[in-house]
Amino acid sequence: MLNRIVPISLDKNQSNHSYFTAQEYLERRFDREKGKLAFRAKTVEEWRSWHRRLENKLKALTGYDTMRTCPLLPRVTERVEKGTYIRERVEIQTEPGIIMPIYVLIPKERRSEKMPVVIAPHGHDSGGKITVAGCVEIQGVAERVKNYNYDYGVQFVREGFVVFCPDARGFGERREWTGQGEDKLFSSTCLQLNQMAYPLGQTVAGMWAWDISRLIDYVQSRKDCNPKKIGCAGLSGGGLQTLWAAALDRRISCAVISGYFYGYKESLLKLSNNCSCNYIPHLWEYVDMGDIAALIAPRPLLIETGTRDPLNGESGLKNVKSQYRIVKKAYALLNAKDRLAHDIFEGEHMWHGAKAIPWMKRWLGK
């Protein structure tokens, strides 16, 4: 006798409807596959070997090692007086045919012939460089500066740094066709970039890290910049850029990562509606975020965390501190405990700056 399939009538308004999702399976897979290149070094020699292997692996996973160098062809297109500083608009070429527009904020009061530098990448909901550079004359910028304390480029130039505020690929003047137009000024096209890049062995994160490396090439060519005193500081997606750029380019001598430091499982796997720029094929099989940050050691690193930042994950600060402990072990191993700090402040997802600016001044010789 054949088994009969009896249809079940479901109430469309039923509130306890169940779905057959893959999330729990992928959480188990995460636990099973993770940590192939996690930081476990017990000696400086082990650290050197681990550092070399992980740096090479991350460059391969992100497609960083497929990027093509080219002449920078720098071009200054605008120079505007802004009270205590000057704002230049500069274009450089980071790969053949790939143009990065940058706002360069230059203090009028030069305290030395070659001034220390802060590269200040933006995050999401920024319109690219315009919010970090404090372009409050543009509609929508002042609101974002108020909500996120987002004009940290201006905050740094007021302290005597030459500040470089670039448009990351997919933002501002570099939006792909799906996000272009004035009505979409504060949108991003990370998803479209990754969908084009993944099948070609590249990622948005790799592109961003590469572009900052090329920006450093430009910084070191300028007569007003100290080539040995280059910091990098960013909020949210700017924290992502700072993390990856500092991990892969040792010319960054001081870093501040704000609102982007937590365990991947809670903050990116479980919060899977995060932006596509956070996701890199095979990354979680090798490292967690703390392992990437450990590559920055022994260079000075400050991490900012808001106590109420929803991106911290379901366990909140516990998910952040677990990653900080990884980094702390790397700095301890290298006798550099004083070069690592964690600013946990009462607040949400925003730039704090209270300790970040003194941190840059301390380590970049201001």
Image (cartoon, helix red, strand yellow):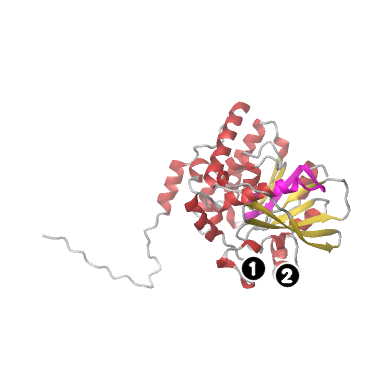
Res 253 → quadrant = top right
Residue drawn at 53 percent across, 48 percent down: 264
The 10 Å Cα crowd at callout 2, few under 14, some 14 to 19, many 20 or more, is few
Q: In the figure, is residue 272 to the left or right of 312?
A: left
**What residue is disc 2 on?**
138
Residue drawn at 24 percent across, 68 percent down: 7
Position above or below: 191 against 185: above
* First reached walking from the N terminus: tag 1 or tag 2: 2
Span shown in magenta: 215-241
Residue 229 within the magenta-colored segment of the rendering: yes
The 10 Å Cα crowd at callout 1, few under 14, some 14 to 19, many 20 or more, is some
Percent of width and height locating residue 117: 77, 48
**350 vs 109, nearest the viewer:** 109
Res 101 → quadrant = bottom right
Q: Quadrant of the C terminus?
A: top right
Q: Amino acid at mark 2?
A: Ile
**Dots 1, 2 in contact, CB < 8 A:** yes
**What residue is disc 1 on?**
185
Q: Amino acid at mark 1?
A: Leu
Residue 233 within the magenta-colored segment of the rendering: yes
Which numbered circle lies on residue 88?
none
* SS type, badge 1: loop
